[in-house]
Amino acid sequence: MRAIRMVGACVVCVLATVVFVLAVVLSITLVLLPVGLAVGYLAIRLYKISVKLALPRPKDFTKGPKRQVRGLRKGADRRVRKAQRRGSTGPKPAQRRPPEDQAWDEAHPENGSCL
């Protein structure tokens, strides 16, 4: 839904820009000045609409973050309880190769990485 609103905001903003350029062209001539001012006012209103579409709605802002945090907290608590039931103590430490394997790799470089 957020992506659709952003696309709509971009389309309305481009339309407002075109209407604004038309208003400037109409305002250059003295005879069409009243029409140019009216079209310019329409362009400003279109810009306002595009900004309203781009910003989050007040309803989404007031209850959105609370629900997201609550959902993250529930998911994290669930994972912690699952790990406690399994008896997990965390990730295993990294294992090092024995020195004799490293010496063999140095003596036989053809078996190393293929370049």
Image (tube, rainbow, N blue to C red):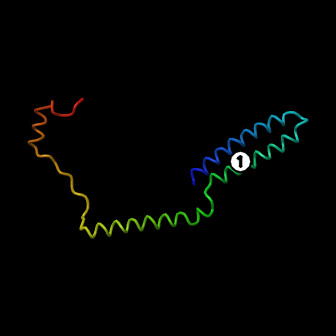
**At x 11% / y 32%, what residue is drawn?**
108
Tell me: 34 left or right of 77: right
Label 1 belongs to which residue? 47
Q: Quadrant of residue 55?
A: bottom right
For mark 1, does the 10 Å Cα neighbourhood hold few (<14), some (14 to 19), or many (20 or more) residues?
Answer: many
**At x 11% / y 41%, what residue is drawn?**
101
Tell me: 90 left or right of 35: left
Where's the C terminus, which quadrant? top left
Q: Secondary structure at mark 1?
A: helix
Vertical side of 112 occupied by 52: above or below: below
**At x 22% / y 31%, what residue is drawn?**
114
**At x 34% / y 65%, what residue is drawn?**
79
List the single residue furthest toward the left: 100
Residue 1 locus on image (x, y percent): 57, 54
**What amino acid is found at the position of numbered circle 1 in the picture?**
Tyr
Q: Quadrant of residue 87?
A: bottom left
List the single residue furthest toward the right: 31
Tell me: 87 left or right of 39: left
Q: Nearer the viewer, residue 78 or 93?
A: 78
Residue 103 locus on image (x, y percent): 10, 38
Tell me: 82 left or right of 13: left
Residue 102 locus on image (x, y percent): 12, 40
Residue 24 locus on image (x, y percent): 79, 37
